[in-house]
Image: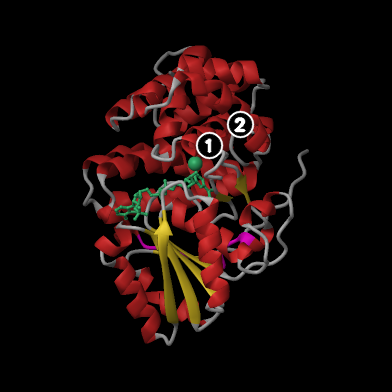
Protein backbone atom coordinates (compact mmCIF):
# COMPACT_ATOMS: atom_id res chain seq x y z
CA UNK A 1 0.00 0.00 0.00
CA UNK A 2 1.34 3.46 -0.86
CA UNK A 3 2.06 6.08 1.81
CA UNK A 4 1.82 9.82 1.22
CA UNK A 5 0.98 13.19 2.71
CA UNK A 6 -1.32 15.75 1.14
CA UNK A 7 -1.04 19.43 1.92
CA UNK A 8 -2.29 22.49 0.08
CA UNK A 9 -3.35 25.51 2.13
CA UNK A 10 -4.51 27.83 -0.70
CA UNK A 11 -7.95 29.37 -0.23
CA UNK A 12 -9.61 29.38 -3.63
CA UNK A 13 -12.16 32.01 -4.69
CA UNK A 14 -13.64 30.96 -8.01
CA UNK A 15 -16.19 32.49 -10.35
CA UNK A 16 -17.14 35.37 -12.60
CA UNK A 17 -16.70 38.66 -10.74
CA UNK A 18 -14.76 37.32 -7.73
CA UNK A 19 -12.03 39.89 -8.35
CA UNK A 20 -14.48 42.19 -6.54
CA UNK A 21 -13.54 40.39 -3.31
CA UNK A 22 -9.84 41.24 -3.67
CA UNK A 23 -10.02 44.23 -1.34
CA UNK A 24 -11.58 42.34 1.54
CA UNK A 25 -9.17 39.46 1.07
CA UNK A 26 -6.08 41.68 0.83
CA UNK A 27 -7.05 43.66 3.93
CA UNK A 28 -6.74 40.49 6.04
CA UNK A 29 -3.00 40.58 5.43
CA UNK A 30 -1.94 44.20 5.01
CA UNK A 31 -3.00 47.69 4.03
CA UNK A 32 0.07 48.13 1.85
CA UNK A 33 0.42 45.78 -1.13
CA UNK A 34 2.81 45.36 -4.04
CA UNK A 35 1.06 44.36 -7.26
CA UNK A 36 3.41 42.34 -9.46
CA UNK A 37 2.24 42.23 -13.07
CA UNK A 38 3.34 42.17 -16.71
CA UNK A 39 3.97 45.04 -19.08
CA UNK A 40 0.83 45.16 -21.22
CA UNK A 41 -2.18 42.93 -20.92
CA UNK A 42 -3.58 43.87 -17.52
CA UNK A 43 -3.18 47.59 -18.30
CA UNK A 44 -4.85 47.17 -21.70
CA UNK A 45 -7.83 45.19 -20.40
CA UNK A 46 -8.34 47.66 -17.55
CA UNK A 47 -7.96 44.90 -14.93
CA UNK A 48 -5.00 46.57 -13.23
CA UNK A 49 -6.86 49.87 -12.78
CA UNK A 50 -9.89 47.99 -11.58
CA UNK A 51 -7.85 46.08 -9.00
CA UNK A 52 -6.20 49.25 -7.70
CA UNK A 53 -9.69 50.77 -7.19
CA UNK A 54 -11.03 47.65 -5.48
CA UNK A 55 -8.06 47.68 -3.10
CA UNK A 56 -8.36 51.40 -2.46
CA UNK A 57 -12.03 51.05 -1.57
CA UNK A 58 -11.05 48.48 1.05
CA UNK A 59 -8.36 50.77 2.46
CA UNK A 60 -5.42 48.96 0.87
CA UNK A 61 -2.71 51.06 -0.74
CA UNK A 62 -1.08 49.58 -3.84
CA UNK A 63 2.34 49.97 -5.33
CA UNK A 64 2.69 48.67 -8.88
CA UNK A 65 5.64 46.75 -10.30
CA UNK A 66 4.76 46.15 -13.95
CA UNK A 67 8.09 45.01 -15.32
CA UNK A 68 7.56 41.24 -15.50
CA UNK A 69 8.18 39.70 -18.93
CA UNK A 70 6.95 36.28 -20.10
CA UNK A 71 9.46 33.67 -18.80
CA UNK A 72 10.52 36.12 -16.06
CA UNK A 73 14.16 36.76 -15.18
CA UNK A 74 15.90 36.84 -11.83
CA UNK A 75 16.80 40.51 -12.37
CA UNK A 76 13.12 41.46 -12.72
CA UNK A 77 12.33 39.53 -9.54
CA UNK A 78 15.23 41.05 -7.61
CA UNK A 79 14.16 44.56 -8.71
CA UNK A 80 10.59 43.95 -7.56
CA UNK A 81 11.85 42.54 -4.24
CA UNK A 82 13.89 45.74 -3.80
CA UNK A 83 10.70 47.79 -4.25
CA UNK A 84 8.85 45.55 -1.76
CA UNK A 85 11.56 46.12 0.85
CA UNK A 86 11.89 49.83 0.20
CA UNK A 87 8.12 50.42 0.39
CA UNK A 88 7.76 48.04 3.33
CA UNK A 89 4.78 46.24 1.81
CA UNK A 90 3.05 43.56 3.85
CA UNK A 91 1.52 41.69 0.90
CA UNK A 92 2.39 40.73 -2.66
CA UNK A 93 -0.40 40.38 -5.22
CA UNK A 94 0.47 38.59 -8.46
CA UNK A 95 -1.78 39.72 -11.32
CA UNK A 96 -1.52 38.05 -14.73
CA UNK A 97 -0.43 34.75 -16.21
CA UNK A 98 2.05 32.27 -14.82
CA UNK A 99 4.93 34.70 -15.29
CA UNK A 100 3.67 37.44 -12.91
CA UNK A 101 2.26 34.84 -10.48
CA UNK A 102 5.51 32.86 -10.29
CA UNK A 103 7.35 36.16 -9.90
CA UNK A 104 5.07 37.29 -7.07
CA UNK A 105 5.93 34.16 -5.07
CA UNK A 106 9.66 34.61 -5.70
CA UNK A 107 9.42 38.31 -4.79
CA UNK A 108 7.65 37.40 -1.55
CA UNK A 109 10.57 35.18 -0.61
CA UNK A 110 13.36 37.50 -1.77
CA UNK A 111 11.78 40.53 -0.06
CA UNK A 112 12.19 38.82 3.32
CA UNK A 113 15.92 38.28 2.97
CA UNK A 114 18.90 40.17 1.60
CA UNK A 115 20.29 37.66 -0.90
CA UNK A 116 19.55 37.44 -4.65
CA UNK A 117 16.56 35.28 -5.48
CA UNK A 118 18.76 32.80 -7.39
CA UNK A 119 20.43 31.82 -4.10
CA UNK A 120 17.14 30.38 -2.87
CA UNK A 121 17.64 27.44 -5.20
CA UNK A 122 20.25 26.25 -2.69
CA UNK A 123 19.17 28.05 0.49
CA UNK A 124 15.69 26.88 1.48
CA UNK A 125 13.34 29.77 2.22
CA UNK A 126 11.56 29.54 5.55
CA UNK A 127 9.46 32.68 5.35
CA UNK A 128 7.83 34.85 2.73
CA UNK A 129 5.42 37.76 2.55
CA UNK A 130 1.81 36.65 2.09
CA UNK A 131 0.86 36.25 -1.59
CA UNK A 132 -2.49 36.55 -3.35
CA UNK A 133 -2.71 35.31 -6.93
CA UNK A 134 -5.14 36.82 -9.43
CA UNK A 135 -4.75 34.71 -12.54
CA UNK A 136 -5.39 35.88 -16.12
CA UNK A 137 -4.43 32.80 -18.16
CA UNK A 138 -5.68 29.24 -17.86
CA UNK A 139 -2.54 27.18 -18.01
CA UNK A 140 0.20 27.05 -15.44
CA UNK A 141 -1.76 26.30 -12.27
CA UNK A 142 0.63 28.69 -10.52
CA UNK A 143 -2.42 30.32 -8.95
CA UNK A 144 -2.84 27.37 -6.57
CA UNK A 145 0.59 25.82 -6.16
CA UNK A 146 3.90 26.69 -4.50
CA UNK A 147 6.10 26.64 -7.59
CA UNK A 148 7.95 29.51 -9.15
CA UNK A 149 9.97 29.29 -12.36
CA UNK A 150 12.65 31.87 -13.12
CA UNK A 151 15.29 32.38 -15.79
CA UNK A 152 18.89 33.38 -15.20
CA UNK A 153 19.32 35.90 -18.04
CA UNK A 154 23.10 35.39 -18.18
CA UNK A 155 23.09 31.62 -18.62
CA UNK A 156 19.60 30.79 -19.94
CA UNK A 157 19.04 28.35 -17.06
CA UNK A 158 15.37 28.13 -16.10
CA UNK A 159 14.79 26.09 -12.94
CA UNK A 160 11.66 25.84 -10.84
CA UNK A 161 11.61 26.02 -7.06
CA UNK A 162 8.94 25.88 -4.40
CA UNK A 163 8.95 25.91 -0.60
CA UNK A 164 6.06 25.57 1.80
CA UNK A 165 6.12 29.30 2.60
CA UNK A 166 5.52 30.05 -1.09
CA UNK A 167 1.95 28.78 -1.26
CA UNK A 168 -0.36 31.68 -2.09
CA UNK A 169 -2.65 32.50 0.81
CA UNK A 170 -5.58 33.09 -1.53
CA UNK A 171 -6.16 32.43 -5.22
CA UNK A 172 -8.68 34.64 -7.00
CA UNK A 173 -9.80 32.82 -10.15
CA UNK A 174 -12.16 35.02 -12.15
CA UNK A 175 -12.73 33.63 -15.67
CA UNK A 176 -13.91 37.04 -16.93
CA UNK A 177 -10.31 38.28 -16.66
CA UNK A 178 -9.34 35.54 -19.13
CA UNK A 179 -11.75 36.62 -21.86
CA UNK A 180 -9.14 39.00 -23.28
CA UNK A 181 -6.57 36.26 -23.92
CA UNK A 182 -5.58 36.25 -27.60
CA UNK A 183 -6.04 32.95 -29.46
CA UNK A 184 -2.35 32.04 -29.31
CA UNK A 185 -2.21 32.54 -25.52
CA UNK A 186 -5.42 30.50 -25.11
CA UNK A 187 -3.90 27.68 -27.19
CA UNK A 188 -0.46 27.58 -25.59
CA UNK A 189 -1.67 27.94 -22.00
CA UNK A 190 -4.47 25.41 -22.60
CA UNK A 191 -1.97 22.89 -23.92
CA UNK A 192 0.14 23.47 -20.79
CA UNK A 193 -2.85 22.19 -18.77
CA UNK A 194 -2.93 19.03 -20.88
CA UNK A 195 0.78 18.40 -20.29
CA UNK A 196 0.41 18.99 -16.56
CA UNK A 197 -2.20 16.28 -16.25
CA UNK A 198 -0.41 13.94 -18.64
CA UNK A 199 2.82 14.23 -16.65
CA UNK A 200 1.09 14.17 -13.29
CA UNK A 201 -1.03 11.14 -14.17
CA UNK A 202 1.97 9.13 -15.37
CA UNK A 203 4.67 10.45 -12.99
CA UNK A 204 6.31 8.26 -10.39
CA UNK A 205 5.15 10.57 -7.57
CA UNK A 206 1.45 10.34 -8.45
CA UNK A 207 -1.09 9.15 -5.94
CA UNK A 208 -4.85 8.76 -5.70
CA UNK A 209 -5.37 12.48 -5.03
CA UNK A 210 -3.29 13.80 -7.93
CA UNK A 211 -4.89 11.23 -10.24
CA UNK A 212 -8.37 12.30 -9.15
CA UNK A 213 -7.55 15.92 -10.03
CA UNK A 214 -6.20 14.75 -13.39
CA UNK A 215 -9.22 12.64 -14.30
CA UNK A 216 -11.62 15.53 -13.76
CA UNK A 217 -9.32 17.76 -15.76
CA UNK A 218 -9.15 15.39 -18.76
CA UNK A 219 -12.93 15.47 -18.74
CA UNK A 220 -12.95 19.29 -18.72
CA UNK A 221 -10.36 19.53 -21.51
CA UNK A 222 -12.30 17.13 -23.70
CA UNK A 223 -15.08 19.67 -24.23
CA UNK A 224 -13.44 23.00 -23.55
CA UNK A 225 -9.82 23.25 -24.71
CA UNK A 226 -10.55 23.66 -28.40
CA UNK A 227 -13.86 25.40 -27.81
CA UNK A 228 -12.20 28.15 -25.74
CA UNK A 229 -9.71 28.59 -28.60
CA UNK A 230 -12.37 28.73 -31.33
CA UNK A 231 -14.97 30.69 -29.34
CA UNK A 232 -12.99 33.21 -27.27
CA UNK A 233 -16.12 34.87 -25.87
CA UNK A 234 -17.65 31.63 -24.62
CA UNK A 235 -17.67 32.34 -20.88
CA UNK A 236 -18.58 28.77 -20.00
CA UNK A 237 -15.57 27.33 -21.82
CA UNK A 238 -13.30 30.00 -20.35
CA UNK A 239 -14.67 29.14 -16.94
CA UNK A 240 -14.12 25.41 -17.43
CA UNK A 241 -10.57 26.04 -18.64
CA UNK A 242 -9.93 28.19 -15.56
CA UNK A 243 -11.13 25.29 -13.45
CA UNK A 244 -8.99 22.85 -15.44
CA UNK A 245 -5.90 25.02 -14.91
CA UNK A 246 -6.44 25.09 -11.15
CA UNK A 247 -7.17 21.36 -10.85
CA UNK A 248 -4.07 20.55 -12.90
CA UNK A 249 -2.08 23.00 -10.76
CA UNK A 250 -3.17 21.08 -7.66
CA UNK A 251 -2.22 17.81 -9.38
CA UNK A 252 1.35 18.91 -10.15
CA UNK A 253 1.67 20.39 -6.68
CA UNK A 254 1.33 16.80 -5.46
CA UNK A 255 3.04 14.79 -8.14
CA UNK A 256 5.32 17.06 -10.17
CA UNK A 257 6.04 17.03 -13.90
CA UNK A 258 8.14 14.92 -16.28
CA UNK A 259 10.45 15.11 -19.30
CA UNK A 260 8.33 17.50 -21.38
CA UNK A 261 8.77 20.16 -18.70
CA UNK A 262 12.39 19.12 -18.09
CA UNK A 263 13.16 19.76 -21.77
CA UNK A 264 10.89 22.76 -22.23
CA UNK A 265 12.39 24.89 -19.47
CA UNK A 266 15.81 25.05 -21.15
CA UNK A 267 14.07 25.74 -24.49
CA UNK A 268 12.24 28.86 -23.25
CA UNK A 269 15.10 29.70 -20.87
CA UNK A 270 17.53 29.98 -23.78
CA UNK A 271 14.86 31.49 -26.07
CA UNK A 272 12.69 33.69 -23.83
CA UNK A 273 10.41 34.68 -26.72
CA UNK A 274 9.08 31.12 -26.87
CA UNK A 275 5.84 30.64 -24.93
CA UNK A 276 6.06 27.79 -22.40
CA UNK A 277 3.06 26.02 -23.93
CA UNK A 278 4.47 26.31 -27.45
CA UNK A 279 7.70 24.69 -26.28
CA UNK A 280 5.65 21.87 -24.75
CA UNK A 281 3.63 21.50 -27.94
CA UNK A 282 6.71 20.69 -30.04
CA UNK A 283 8.02 18.15 -27.53
CA UNK A 284 4.79 16.38 -26.60
CA UNK A 285 4.39 13.71 -29.26
CA UNK A 286 7.98 12.41 -29.21
CA UNK A 287 7.94 12.38 -25.39
CA UNK A 288 4.67 10.45 -25.34
CA UNK A 289 6.10 7.88 -27.75
CA UNK A 290 9.15 7.53 -25.50
CA UNK A 291 7.00 6.87 -22.42
CA UNK A 292 4.43 4.62 -24.10
CA UNK A 293 5.83 1.27 -22.98
CA UNK A 294 6.29 2.36 -19.37
CA UNK A 295 2.65 3.32 -18.95
CA UNK A 296 0.48 1.74 -21.60
CA UNK A 297 -2.40 1.15 -19.23
CA UNK A 298 -2.34 4.80 -18.13
CA UNK A 299 -2.51 5.83 -21.78
CA UNK A 300 -5.67 3.77 -22.24
CA UNK A 301 -7.20 5.35 -19.12
CA UNK A 302 -6.36 8.84 -20.36
CA UNK A 303 -7.79 7.97 -23.79
CA UNK A 304 -10.99 6.90 -22.03
CA UNK A 305 -11.19 10.11 -19.98
CA UNK A 306 -10.66 12.19 -23.11
CA UNK A 307 -13.66 10.48 -24.64
CA UNK A 308 -11.81 8.52 -27.35
CA UNK A 309 -13.96 5.63 -28.55
CA UNK A 310 -12.42 2.19 -28.01
CA UNK A 311 -14.44 0.54 -30.83
CA UNK A 312 -12.68 -2.82 -31.06
CA UNK A 313 -9.17 -1.42 -30.65
CA UNK A 314 -6.54 -3.65 -29.01
CA UNK A 315 -4.86 -2.36 -25.82
CA UNK A 316 -1.86 -1.25 -27.89
CA UNK A 317 -4.02 0.51 -30.46
CA UNK A 318 -6.09 2.21 -27.79
CA UNK A 319 -2.93 3.41 -26.02
CA UNK A 320 -1.62 4.75 -29.34
CA UNK A 321 -4.89 6.58 -29.93
CA UNK A 322 -3.94 8.96 -27.11
CA UNK A 323 -0.90 10.07 -29.11
CA UNK A 324 -3.01 10.44 -32.26
CA UNK A 325 -5.56 12.47 -30.30
CA UNK A 326 -2.78 14.73 -29.04
CA UNK A 327 -1.65 15.34 -32.62
CA UNK A 328 -5.24 16.19 -33.58
CA UNK A 329 -5.52 18.56 -30.64
CA UNK A 330 -2.29 20.30 -31.62
CA UNK A 331 -3.51 20.68 -35.20
CA UNK A 332 -6.83 22.14 -34.04
CA UNK A 333 -4.91 24.63 -31.87
CA UNK A 334 -2.53 25.49 -34.72
CA UNK A 335 0.35 24.22 -32.60
CA UNK A 336 1.41 21.30 -34.74
CA UNK A 337 4.89 22.75 -35.16
CA UNK A 338 8.56 21.74 -34.92
CA UNK A 339 11.36 22.97 -32.68
CA UNK A 340 13.00 24.68 -35.64
CA UNK A 341 9.79 26.63 -36.37
CA UNK A 342 10.24 28.28 -32.96
CA UNK A 343 13.66 29.61 -34.00
CA UNK A 344 15.75 27.16 -31.94
CA UNK A 345 19.22 26.63 -33.44
CA UNK A 346 20.18 23.00 -33.92
CA UNK A 347 23.58 23.45 -32.32
CA UNK A 348 21.83 24.52 -29.08
CA UNK A 349 20.26 21.08 -28.60
CA UNK A 350 23.16 19.61 -26.55
CA UNK A 351 23.05 22.61 -24.16
CA UNK A 352 19.27 22.19 -23.84
CA UNK A 353 19.53 18.47 -23.15
CA UNK A 354 22.27 19.07 -20.55
CA UNK A 355 20.19 21.68 -18.75
CA UNK A 356 17.18 19.37 -18.63
CA UNK A 357 19.26 17.39 -16.11
CA UNK A 358 21.04 20.21 -14.29
CA UNK A 359 18.01 22.49 -13.82
CA UNK A 360 15.06 20.08 -13.88
CA UNK A 361 16.54 16.94 -12.35
CA UNK A 362 13.47 16.28 -10.19
CA UNK A 363 11.26 16.16 -13.32
CA UNK A 364 13.67 13.73 -15.00
CA UNK A 365 13.56 11.52 -11.89
CA UNK A 366 9.77 11.63 -11.85
CA UNK A 367 9.41 10.51 -15.47
CA UNK A 368 7.80 7.07 -15.82
CA UNK A 369 10.50 5.73 -18.17
CA UNK A 370 14.14 6.02 -17.12
CA UNK A 371 15.94 8.50 -19.34
CA UNK A 372 19.53 9.64 -19.92
CA UNK A 373 21.07 12.60 -21.74
CA UNK A 374 21.50 10.65 -24.97
CA UNK A 375 17.77 9.83 -25.10
CA UNK A 376 16.76 13.40 -24.28
CA UNK A 377 18.95 14.65 -27.11
CA UNK A 378 17.31 12.11 -29.42
CA UNK A 379 13.80 13.36 -28.51
CA UNK A 380 14.94 16.94 -29.15
CA UNK A 381 16.37 15.93 -32.53
CA UNK A 382 13.24 14.00 -33.47
CA UNK A 383 11.16 17.06 -32.55
CA UNK A 384 13.35 19.45 -34.53
P1 LIG B 1 2.57 34.43 -19.32
O1 LIG B 1 2.22 34.83 -17.96
O2 LIG B 1 4.02 34.43 -19.69
O3 LIG B 1 1.76 35.35 -20.35
C1 LIG B 1 1.93 35.17 -21.74
C2 LIG B 1 1.43 36.41 -22.51
O4 LIG B 1 0.01 36.49 -22.40
C3 LIG B 1 1.97 37.72 -21.94
O5 LIG B 1 2.35 38.55 -23.02
C4 LIG B 1 0.80 38.29 -21.17
O6 LIG B 1 0.78 39.72 -21.11
C5 LIG B 1 -0.37 37.79 -21.98
N1 LIG B 1 -1.62 37.66 -21.20
C6 LIG B 1 -1.78 37.08 -20.00
N2 LIG B 1 -3.09 37.11 -19.61
C7 LIG B 1 -3.75 37.77 -20.59
C8 LIG B 1 -5.11 38.16 -20.75
N3 LIG B 1 -6.07 37.82 -19.88
N4 LIG B 1 -5.44 38.88 -21.86
C9 LIG B 1 -4.49 39.20 -22.78
N5 LIG B 1 -3.20 38.83 -22.69
C10 LIG B 1 -2.82 38.13 -21.60
O7 LIG B 1 1.98 32.99 -19.71
P2 LIG B 1 1.72 31.67 -18.86
O8 LIG B 1 0.52 31.80 -18.03
O9 LIG B 1 1.79 30.56 -19.84
O10 LIG B 1 2.99 31.56 -17.88
C11 LIG B 1 4.22 31.04 -18.34
C12 LIG B 1 5.25 30.97 -17.24
O11 LIG B 1 4.79 30.13 -16.17
C13 LIG B 1 6.54 30.35 -17.74
O12 LIG B 1 7.66 30.98 -17.16
C14 LIG B 1 6.42 28.93 -17.28
O13 LIG B 1 7.66 28.26 -17.19
C15 LIG B 1 5.77 29.10 -15.93
N6 LIG B 1 5.07 27.90 -15.41
C16 LIG B 1 4.84 27.81 -14.07
C17 LIG B 1 4.22 26.71 -13.52
C18 LIG B 1 3.95 26.61 -12.06
O14 LIG B 1 3.51 25.56 -11.60
N7 LIG B 1 4.18 27.65 -11.28
C19 LIG B 1 3.81 25.56 -14.34
C20 LIG B 1 4.02 25.77 -15.75
C21 LIG B 1 4.64 26.89 -16.23
P3 LIG B 1 1.89 40.56 -20.27
O15 LIG B 1 3.10 40.59 -21.15
O16 LIG B 1 1.28 41.89 -20.08
O17 LIG B 1 2.13 39.81 -19.00
MN1 LIG C 1 3.73 23.91 -17.47
Front position among marks 1 and 2:
2
Give the residue pinned by disc 2: 355
Q: Nearer the viewer, residue 107 or 220?
A: 107
Query: Magenta includes 341?
Result: no
In screen coordinates, is 206 left or right of 251? Answer: right
Quarter of the image that includes the C terminus = top left
In screen coordinates, is 11 left or right of 271? Answer: right
For residue 45, above or below residue 289: below
Residue positioned 37% across, 28% down in the render: 342
Query: Magenta includes 173?
Result: yes
User: Percent x, y for residue 183?
Assistant: 26, 42
In screen coordinates, is 22 left or right of 334? Answer: right
**Beta carbon of the mark 2 residue lies under 8 A of ligand 1:** no
| Neighbour tally class for label 2: few under 14, some 14-19, many 20 plus, Cα within 10 Å | many
The image's mark for residue 337 is none
Quarter of the image that includes the N terminus = top right
- Give the colouring mode of the picture: secondary structure
Q: Secondary structure at mark 1?
A: helix
Give the residue pinned by disc 1: 265
Sequence-earlier tag: 1 or 2: 1
Residue positioned 63% across, 42% down in the render: 255
Task: Find out whether the residues at labels 1 and 2 contact each other: C-beta distance under 8 Å.
Answer: yes
**Beta carbon of the mark 1 residue lies under 8 A of ligand 1:** yes
User: Percent x, y for residue 262?
Assistant: 58, 33
Q: Nearer the viewer, residue 60 or 243?
A: 60
Amino acid sequence: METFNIYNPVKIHFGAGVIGEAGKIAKKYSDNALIVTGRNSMQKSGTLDRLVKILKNAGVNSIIFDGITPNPTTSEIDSAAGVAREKKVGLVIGLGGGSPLDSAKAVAVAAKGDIPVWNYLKTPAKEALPVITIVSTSGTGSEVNRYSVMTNPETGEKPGFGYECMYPKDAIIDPEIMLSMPAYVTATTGFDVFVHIFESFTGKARNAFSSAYCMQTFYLLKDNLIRAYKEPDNVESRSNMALASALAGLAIDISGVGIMHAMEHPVSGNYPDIAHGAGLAVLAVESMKYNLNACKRDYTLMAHHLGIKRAGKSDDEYAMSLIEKTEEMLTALNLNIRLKDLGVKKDKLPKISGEAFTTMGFAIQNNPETIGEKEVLKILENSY
